[in-house]
Image: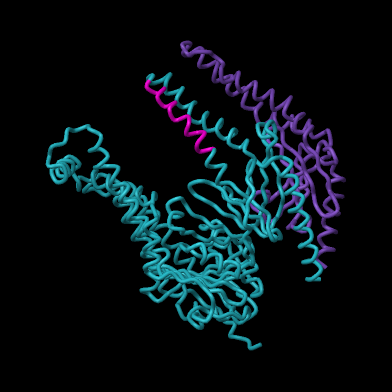
Chain colours: A purple, B cyan
Amino acid sequence: MELLDPAVKRVWTIKGLLGWGILLPVTATVDVILFFLDNSSFLPGLWTGILFVTCLLWVLIIPKLRYRYWRYELRDEDLYAIRGIWNRVQTIVPLRRIQHLDVEQDLIEGNFDIARLVVHTAGTRSTDVVVPGLPYDEAVRLRDTVRDFISQYMD
Amino acid sequence: MEEPSAEFRRLHPLTFVHYVFLAIVGFVISFFSSTDTGVISTPFLIFAIVYIIIVGPFSIAKYIRFRYYATNDEIVIYYGVFKRVRRNIPSDRIQNVSIQRNLLSRILGTASVKIETAGTASAEGVLAFVGIQEAERLRNLFRTVQTTATIEENGSTLPGFHMPLQRVALAGIYQFSFALIAVVYTLFFQLISLDVIDLDKLGIWLTERFFSGEIVTGSWPIIAATFILPVLIGGWILGFLQYLIRFYNFRMELGPIKIYRKFGLLTIRESTLPYKRVQSFLIRSNPVMRLRRWYRLEIQTLGLESGERGFQPAMPFAKWSEITSLAPQIRPFTLPDTYSNVSRRTIQRYSIRYSLMIAIPLVILFVLWSENALWGFCLLPLAWGISWMQYLCHQWTFHDGNLLIRRRIFSQQFWIVPVERFQAFEITASFFQRRMGLCTLIVDTAGAGNFRYPRIIDLKMDDAKHLFGSLYDAFQKKDRNGAQSSA
């Protein structure tokens, strides 16, 4: 089975920083103001602390773990993916059930030249299975392989 | 093929009566939503201004902009005030033409026609409202393409299911409505705040009437009698009425390629459902209904009515034998003699989970309130009991090309999922499940809800892998055959 592009770890780190890290100065400021206004509050900086730890987790540890447990494989008739840190999920998406396919890339991913393959089925739970962190060319290659399979099957 | 006149048509002019009716409802609600009596309330004023300036003119513009024409090949709808849309729906894409008539439209002789396609809700066409003849014309127009017949035309010859009034009333007895209670109580307190009802006088009247005035205030039987009992009885009666109104004269018939359904007292719903779109069966029940062997059969479809979340009632209240004789005609299935259980360790896992769900709030209560909270720990055996019941109620088997799953103690579910309807296969195992060598097997189907979907929880890892393999093999075999036969 294939691993993701290691660059995805840095993408996740940056996204984690953007998500949680931006909140950090805000809560820190609020905490400082509160401390000077009313120093009776117990454990000053508690929320900032909690947020800081969460942030560290999301930036340093989660990306590595996510990367470690992500595997995928495009087999003859299906796409097979294993992922998840806490909840380990194995999914098989039969290629015949795929409704449409997207290769997606945002600015950060573009910087690292990686992309996501998004597979849509008619199902409701795993409507879209997303394989993140593929090298862009690899994502396009996968998409074309699946597309060829589907059009062959349709004929 | 004859070419029907391709001229544009508008909606029925009586559509405006519907608009006016809605407006009146809006005015009435906004009028009563304030407790100040005698003065014109702010919500009412806001509603009136918004209605007169925006909604009213917009409705007229909407009506004027709405035009359509229908031929044998397609229906074209032009609509939109600001964003102008032209929607073409080719007739071979039309899955269903459903006609809905609420009380008002039955008085006015109008109907709302919904043209359903396999796509999402936004790809559908709704004509609200047209005259009843026009509705029939549209349905017949697209029926010629789909070659079908209606219930009225040759109803009795087809196999089907009919609920006479007795059956609907019997089914209604098993219903309970929470939503309507909320409405009634909101209304009740609204009347109190408007001084229509005086709570003190009501209390005195109640105690005098039912307890001959001898009740000590604050004793709990009176609280139960004056508050909880009416809620329960009210919820029951409302549930009964709601069910009666919804499923009155329920009729389902199995045509050559479609299922027809027609039901309702005030709003009559009439729709057809192609067999092709049937994804799976869900048979529901609860312990009370089970006592008298009553069940409810639902068909999971690609999600026609968003309100039904893809589950359509096919036999709202039926005996098991009725279901097992009729449902296989919709999609063949057979029932096995034995079912497999999941791993016994599920009892342990769920006991721990439920115990924590009981214990954590109790500890918080103990800290914040009093040590009386500790008595709550007497409930702990319940955690084990429920887990054990849950284990007994959870069974599965893969039989004759269908995955059969039975689940849940109270709101019992029995799934029949044809293997060729699977969209994706999934095995998930949480941290704790992995420690116990367990996992959950999920099959994704089209049109299942976000919360209601077929899954087997706490299978042994080896069993799951084995089942996963055999399901997938069966799926591929059927799918390849399907591909060859269609090619």
Q: Indicate the quadrant containing the C terminus of chain B: top left, top right, bottom left or bottom right.
A: bottom right
**Residue nearest the viewer, comparing B48 with B278:** B278
Exactly how many numbered labels are in the figure? 0
Q: Indicate the quadrant containing the N terminus of chain B: top left, top right, bottom left or bottom right.
A: bottom right
**Residue nearest the viewer, comparing B380 with B80:** B380
Residue B84, percent across and down? Answer: 58, 64
Which secondary structure is most common in the magenta stretch? helix
Find the magenta span and give its range.
Answer: B372-387
> Can residue B120 be seen by looking at this rendering?
no
**Residue nearest the viewer, comparing A81 with B291:** B291
Is residue B201 located in the magenta-colored stretch of the structure? no
Query: Seen from this angle, which residue lies furthest front?
Result: B337
Residue B276 occupies which quadrant of the picture? bottom right
Report whether B244 appears left or right of A108.
left
- Above or below, B44 against B373 in this view is below
Query: Seen from this angle, which residue lies furthest bottom?
Result: B2
Residue at the (83%, 45%) spot, across then down: A73
Residue A133, percent across and down? Answer: 80, 39
Residue at the (69%, 23%) spot, across then down: A56
Is residue B385 located in the magenta-colored stretch of the structure? yes
Residue at the (87%, 50%) spot, across then down: A141
Report whether A73 appears left or right of B447.
right
> Can residue B223 be seen by looking at this rendering?
yes
Report whether B393 appears left or right of B54.
right
- Above or below, B466 against B481 in this view is above
Residue B311, percent across and down? Answer: 55, 59
Report whether A62 appears left or right of B33.
right
Residue B327, percent across and down? Answer: 57, 66
